[in-house]
């Protein structure tokens, strides 16, 4: 039954009706581990087409510096938006508009400073996350809760700044400083080996230029539409680490191809370097190099064992992986091995 006496109207959502707790809920829910927060700032550098990213962790401070194209004042003002992003979800990982707040639950203060080539000034934001959290906690504990609006929270505890830059006029970069890391989060970032492995599994890190590395980097950029980036990791007084995937030795020149559906639609780009002696490759500096890894936008899905059951050890029977439409790709690799007398 339709009520013909009903009258409807649209009502604008006021800024005070959007609670600041939304920031706390989403940031802590998505970034409960400090390495997740670190990844978001590194990924922003990847999306900014950086060639090199330096990560420094020392006690309660972490600093991420990239040489990407940087931001001007208009762009850095836009970066403060919450839940809004101009990034393409098809091309970039950080497109949800939350990543800039990934350190909300783990530190006292976070500062982003940026510069584009040719700019006279540096521009940036300082966010007092610790004070924001304490205000929200105090309101939740109060018997007479007032609620804290998200726009008011941002207005009170974030500051936009600009200052002269006296370096090279062509410099371009973004620097993220995370200060006052909590005890729990310091431990998560102060293990160099764990941070190194985490970055390799979540970021499109460039191969070293040794062996086939440089050639594969070019393929990933051209065909997989990734930005392979060099990453250096400095943690406290430990030795500096150049983060990069292992480059196997004792292999033929790398080859590449596309996995396609029967209608010709490209499903995935694949590259490989076959063992020169027909035997399984030994681990490289503690890292496994045999087998295939599945990656999407730099994120590793599973490990090198995930696809191992799809083909036997060298010298075994037929080797296949079935793609929709009965497309068998690994038979092609098997054929190459047979042609070279490897099996």
Image (cartoon, rainbow, N blue to C red):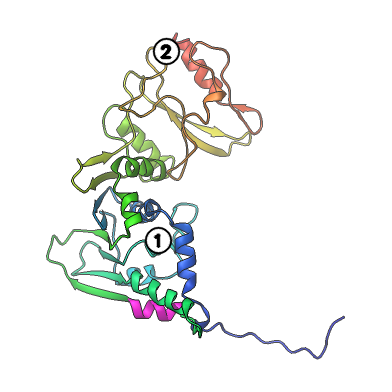
Marks 2 and 1, how far apart at CA: 46 Å
Q: Secondary structure at mark 2?
A: loop
Quarter holding the N terminus is bottom right
Q: Position of residue 157 (x, y in %)?
A: 34, 77
Please tell me whether residue 337 is drawn above or below residue 130 in the rendered image: above
Near-viewer residue (292 or 33) = 33
Q: Can I make out residue 205 in this image?
A: no
Do labels 2 and 1 touch, CB within 8 Å?
A: no
Q: Can I make out residue 199 in this image?
A: yes
Q: Position of residue 62 (x, y in %)?
A: 27, 56
Residue 40 picture quarter: bottom left
In the image, the segment drawn in magenta is 150-157
Task: Determine whether, in the image, residue 102 is placed left or right of residue 258.
Answer: left
Please tell me whether residue 340 is drawn above or below residue 281 in the rendered image: above
- The residue drawn where x is 32% and y is 28% is 247
Say which residue label 1 marks. 102
Q: Judge the density around disc 1: few (<14), some (14-19), many (≥20) Cα neighbours within 10 Å.
A: many
Q: Judge the density around disc 2: few (<14), some (14-19), many (≥20) Cα neighbours within 10 Å.
A: some
Near-viewer residue (321 or 157) = 157
Q: Nearer the viewer, mark 2 or mark 1?
A: 1
Please tell me whether residue 79 is drawn above or below residue 31 in the rendered image: below
Say which residue label 2 marks. 278
Q: Secondary structure at mark 1?
A: loop
- The residue drawn where x is 28% and y is 63% is 180
The answer to whether residue 136 is magenta is no
Dominant secondary structure (helix, strand or loop) of the stretch shown in magenta: helix
Near-viewer residue (292 or 282) = 282
- The residue drawn where x is 35% and y is 69% is 129
Task: Tell me the number on the disc at residue 324.
Answer: none
Please tell me whether residue 22 is drawn above or below residue 273 in the rendered image: below
């Amino acid at each position: 039954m339709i009520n013909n006496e009903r009258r409807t109207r649209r009502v604008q959502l006021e800024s005070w009706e959007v609670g600041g707790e939304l920031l706390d809920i989403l940031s802590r829910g998505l970034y409960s581990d400090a390495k997740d927060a670190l990844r978001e700032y590194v990924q922003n550098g990847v999306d900014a087409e950086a060639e090199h990213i330096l990560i420094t962790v020392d006690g309660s401070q972490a600093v991420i510096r990239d040489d990407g194209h940087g931001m001007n004042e208009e762009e850095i003002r836009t970066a403060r938006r919450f839940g809004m992003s101009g990034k393409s979800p098809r091309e970039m990982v950080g497109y949800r508009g939350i990543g800039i707040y990934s350190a909300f639950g783990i530190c006292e203060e976070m500062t982003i400073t940026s510069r584009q080539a040719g700019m006279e000034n540096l521009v940036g934001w300082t966010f007092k996350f610790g004070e924001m959290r304490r205000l929200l906690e105090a309101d939740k504990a109060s018997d007479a809760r007032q609620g804290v609006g998200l726009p008011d929270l941002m207005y009170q505890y974030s500051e936009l700044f600009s200052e002269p830059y006296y370096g090279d006029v062509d410099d371009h970069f973004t620097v993220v400083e995370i200060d006052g890391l909590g005890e729990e989060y310091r431990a998560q970032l102060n293990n160099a080996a764990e941070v190194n492995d985490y970055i390799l599994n979540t970021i499109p890190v460039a191969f070293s230029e040794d062996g086939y590395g440089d050639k594969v980097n070019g393929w990933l950029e051209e065909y997989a539409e990734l930005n392979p980036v060099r990453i250096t990791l400095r943690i406290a007084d430990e030795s500096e680490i150049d983060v990069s995937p292992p480059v196997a030795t004792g292999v033929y020149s790398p080859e590449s191809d596309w996995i396609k559906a029967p209608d010709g639609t490209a499903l995935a780009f694949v590259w490989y370097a076959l063992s020169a002696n027909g035997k399984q490759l030994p681990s490289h500096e503690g890292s496994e190099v045999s087998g295939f890894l599945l990656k999407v936008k730099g994120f590793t899905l599973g490990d090198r064992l995930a696809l191992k059951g799809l083909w036997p050890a060298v010298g075994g029977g037929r080797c296949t992986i079935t793609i929709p439409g009965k497309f068998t790709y690994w038979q092609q690799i098997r054929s190459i091995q047979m042609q070279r007398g490897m099996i």
